[in-house]
Amino acid sequence: MTYTIKIRRGSKAEPFYSDYTLEDTGVLSVMDVLRRIYREQDGTLAFFDHEACHQAACGRCLVRCNGKTVLACAETAPADMTLEPWNEEKLVRDLLCD
Amino acid sequence: MSESIIPMTTDVLVVGSGGAGLRAAIAAAEAGQSVLVMAKGKADRSGASLLAGANVSADVMCDGRSLYEMGLDYGDKDDSQDKWYRDIIHEGFYLNDRDLVRRYVELAPKVVRELVESGMKLADESEGGRQIGVPGASILDYLYKRAKAEGVTFCENTMLLDLLKSADGVVCGGLFLRLYDGELVRVGAKAVVLATGGMHGCYSFNSGTSGLCGAGQASAIRAGAAMTQMEMVTFCPDVICAPAKYRGSIIPYIIQCFGFGRLLNGKGERFLHKYMSDRAVDLALHTEWNKLLLCYAMDRELNAGLGNADGGVTFSLNDLTGSEWDRLYTLLPELKKGMYKEIMALNEQNRGISVYAAGHYFDGGILVDDKMAATLPGLFAGGECAGGLFGANRVGAATTQMLVQGLQAGESAAAFAAGNSLAEPDYALLERVTQQAVRPFTVQNGEDPRGLRKAVVDTITRSAGVVRDYRQMMIGLDNLEWLNNIDVSAEGGRAYNRPWIDWLEARDMIQCGKAILSSSFRRDESRGVFIRSDCMFTDDRTLTATIYQNGRAIMAPVEQGDVAPDPVKRDYFENLEEVITRLSYGGEE
């Protein structure tokens, strides 16, 4: 399956969008997609992953996926997705909110 | 000083905010010391404590008599601290530090009673009469609330870079990275407690949270502290490896511990009996000894090319009857909710899930005495980052370990802080560790940290896995030495610079991996969770623990006291079955 991903980047004052595509045959979470983009395509992408449980237990990896606020680790990745930070007030950079 | 560093001071510095760190913070604050906890993630949601028992039902152990006296009628009133003490040593294949085991069984009733009396919801059933079941998150919520009430200060999203010592060698704080703004923070403290948990990140497939990369262990190693039994790594057998979305979840293991499910190879066949006797298969399927036995069988099956398409084996529930399904859901109602519901849907559709042995618990760690003092003055350690309690195999609960050792480390650190003034750091050391930490920003055209990290993890995973051999360990150690000398570059700003964090974590994992492999080399036998295919015997004529310090591993005798094995050398499995018969709960067939 081909995933097409648009991600809002940067700060609240100066946002911009980056586009990515990736191929995978398995069932991926939004978190899996983000980790693959970081590892394989774009080392500058910021999202909560430094102390994440990946099992819907810590509740720290919130993002907006196609307009809905979800846990990145618990949400099955749709083929087409737009990812945005879930909280403008707490935005650190890209998808990372404090 | 070329770098600007934010200064902070406290009486007692606690690094890590899982169960051990929080319990240490409470103890030190109750003793009247100011306490600062540095958490890598959120203060109440850091570390592996959260995932204990898949956050469904974590076993917290205590001797049955004490549980009974707490009013829990499933507590085995014929049990005793001494029986439990003996069992832990048999389970640990006689490498346990006896003083640590004694402290563990003595303090367990105090910390378990706290949980019971806090009113948290306990799981209804209890196996063996020696444990209560609670979700990991409930323990953290309880401890965090108590720590806040005691006035403990927390800094979140901060990563330990290195320990600081005074000119005369006393540990007097730590250097940290504040992840979100990239600022360096120097904490001066009269005493330091390391409670950083396991080294899960060293293994490409593991059951921990993403931040568990051995920062405490590596910092202790760099500061010159002694480590013990670093070769002992417990793997968990039924951890989901595919579908990717559920990777790392131990929920199949929890289900299996309740007596449900079968393991099938790539051909759909059972395989345990190929590698062990009927008696051992029985133990693998029906006792807490399942971890090492099942992992061994899985490793051998994959090694023989008989894994499934996902590179694991299949965990299947498709032979359950309707009433068995009902019983499973009654025992574990959480399986009907959220992510677990999705996983169970895969099972119900007979699609099965792929599982494999994941890096799960680190029996070895920082060498401590029964007051949880490390070999450097001013340094204490508790929980999974401390070694020696469980010897060569943990059957007892790591949750109880974190609570008991956290409490003890906090009390000891508070006593040390009360008797000592705040020491100035050795400024040359501070400058050196600071420059090392920011080095990727000064290197031009260095390697990509992401690639280095992957190479480190792949190396440790391959060479220090479930079953090891001399050749693989040699290659692994050589690789780590080589990787240790590779320069990397980090670009852009320092605020949440993920490649920089990757390198800092890889740097720690190289230290941990070297300690694991150097210690593995010294053990030319198989014992407990440590299995070498080129030494498939256990040699009880010499009972020694590895001590790793300043880049070298040595063997030191383990005082046996009154729980000791016969001084013989025999086949690994034959020995294992013999050990089981000595357990108070193992008995004769």
Image (cartoon, helix red, strand yellow):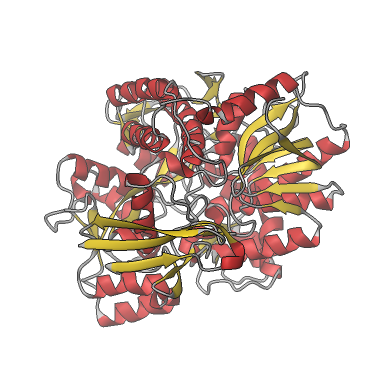
Q: Nearer the viewer, residue B173 or B103?
A: B173
Left or right, B510 with respect to B139, comes to left
Q: Position of residue A64 (x, y in %)?
A: 45, 69
The answer to whether residue B340 is visible is yes
Q: Quadrant of the N terminus of chain B?
A: top right
Can you give x and y, in whole percent of width and height, for residue B417 in the image?
83, 37
Image quarter for residue B139? bottom right
Residue B467, percent from left and from top: 31, 35
Query: Which residue lies at the image location 17% right of the left edge and 53% below the top edge?
Result: B308
Name above or below for residue B500 compared with residue A28.
above
**Whether residue B77 is situated above or below residue B523 in the rendered picture:** below
- Looking at the image, residue B140 sits to the left or right of residue B250; the answer is right
Residue shown at the point (31%, 34%) measured from the top left: B462
Residue B374, image quadrant = top right
Residue B205 in sight here: no
Camera-side residue: B245 or B393? B245
Q: Position of residue B450 (x, y in %)?
A: 39, 38
In front of the other: A92 or B562:
A92
- In the depicted structure, whether residue B21 falls above or below residue B557: below
> Closer to the camera, B347 or A65?
A65
B510 above or below B500?
above
Residue depicted at 61% across the width and 57% down the height: B42
